[in-house]
Image (spheres, grey):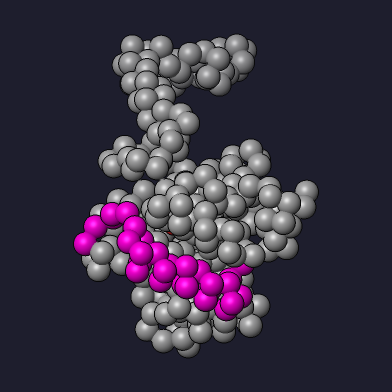
């Protein structure tokens, strides 16, 4: 089976073939999504919200991302694995950023890293790509800046911000990024950026014109209902399915319906008889 690479994505954009991306944080999910045919598995720092139960992505560490990326990489036979660089793992200095990206690439099995930001980080993106580290950009609503934005609202809806976003996307392309995530921006702007860029745009809340779409797997499977953004389509309601299964398990255990004979291991009849006889003999001797 041929691995999805940076080259594959270039060809997909040229052939107007859509790129599908879902987040994954563990081996079992990665394997299911990979076998279903997803092109890219993103070990997003949404790990913080979805798996670790934080309020936002800020507390996620490089160690957290590395731990989960290793598991995802073991489950991905075809998909490209992209690891998010967490908050403050690439902002302090380019040297520290290169070290962190290098560790992620060396020790986890990731094929690329993702960074939030545009012109501001273009120099760093160039250093990474020059060093052979494929970089995916992320513009628009960048959750690591939630406190600067004051929430998770729609981005780049005014002319000035839209112009900056377009410039940022061109700066990322120029710096060598192989794709760029566009999060929660007007569909019209995402379309314009998609037409202008030669690299694929991956939308999340950015309309249908993007070259690909990304969603958090737990959102689209209906497992995470703490907050469901407008841009999420729920393709299943796994929370309800799991809830039903767990309640049935509890009932079955309480009523001795589980485990049934089929789920149990049995001693052969003759061994059981000999064992019982031995116990009886021992009891006799004690008396
Ligand atoms: O962390 C994440 O899951 C992401 C995607 C939602 C794009 O950055």
Looking at this view, is 42 or 153 the one in front?
153
Residue drawn at the location 45% of the way across and 50% of the way down: 187
- State the image coordinates of residue 76 (x, y, percent, origin top left): 63, 51
Image side of residue 192 versus residue 31, left or right? left
Q: Where is residue 121 in the image (x, y as percent from the top left)?
A: 45, 79
Horizontally, residue 77 falls left or right of residue 73, namely right
Residue 83 in sight: no
* Residue 268 visible in the snapshot: yes
* Frontmost residue, 270 versus 45: 45
Name the residue at 46% across, 29% down.
Answer: 236
Q: From the image, which quarter does the C terminus lie in?
A: top left
| Rendered location of residue 254, percent (x, y) | 31, 16
Is residue 233 depicted above or below 252 in this figure? below
Relative placement, left or right, of 207 versus 179 is left
Would you say residue 157 sits in the magenta stretch? yes
Whether residue 211 is situated above or below residue 193 in the rendered picture = above
**Which residues make up the magenta segment?**
150-178
Left or right, residue 146 beside residue 286: left
- The residue furthest front is 159
Q: Most extreme residue toward the right, as rendered?
A: 1
Q: Which residue is drawn at 64% across and 38% down?
A: 36
Where, by quadrant of the figure, is residue 126 drawn?
bottom right
Front in this rendered view, residue 122 or 260: 122
| 4 to 273, vertically: above or below | below
* Residue beneath the point at 68% across and 63% down: 6
Residue 58 magenta-drawn?
Answer: no
- Measured as percent of width and height from the top left, residue 133 is found at 61, 75
């Amino acid at each position: 089976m041929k691995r999805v690479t940076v080259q594959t994505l270039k060809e997909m954009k040229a052939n107007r073939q859509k790129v599908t991306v879902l987040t994954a944080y563990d081996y079992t999910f990665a394997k299911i999504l990979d076998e279903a045919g997803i092109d890219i598995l993103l070990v997003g720092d949404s790990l913080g919200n979805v798996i670790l139960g934080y309020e936002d992505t800020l507390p996620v560490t490089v160690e957290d991302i590395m731990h989960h990326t290793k598991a995802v990489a073991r489950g991905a036979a075809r998909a490209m694995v992209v690891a998010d660089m967490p908050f403050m793992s690439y902002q302090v200095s380019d040297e520290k950023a290169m070290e962190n990206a290098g560790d992620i690439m060396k020790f986890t099995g990731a094929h690329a890293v993702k960074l939030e930001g545009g012109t501001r980080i273009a120099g760093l993106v160039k250093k990474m790509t020059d060093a052979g580290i494929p970089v995916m950009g992320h513009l628009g609503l960048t959750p690591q800046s939630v406190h600067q934005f004051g929430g998770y609202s729609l981005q780049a809806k005014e002319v000035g911000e839209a112009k900056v976003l377009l410039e940022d996307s061109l700066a990322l392309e120029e710096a060598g990024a192989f794709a760029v995530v566009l999060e929660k921006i007007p569909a019209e702007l995402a379309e314009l950026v998609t037409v202008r860029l030669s690299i694929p745009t991956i939308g999340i809340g950015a309309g249908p014109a993007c070259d690909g779409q990304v969603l958090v797997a737990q959102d689209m499977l209906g497992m995470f209902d703490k907050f469901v953004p407008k841009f999420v389509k729920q393709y299943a309601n796994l929370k309800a399915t799991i809830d039903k299964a767990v309640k049935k398990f509890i009932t079955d255990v309480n009523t001795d319906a589980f485990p049934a004979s089929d789920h149990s291991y049995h001693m052969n009849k003759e061994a059981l008889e000999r064992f019982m006889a031995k116990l009886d003999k021992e009891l006799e001797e004690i008396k």
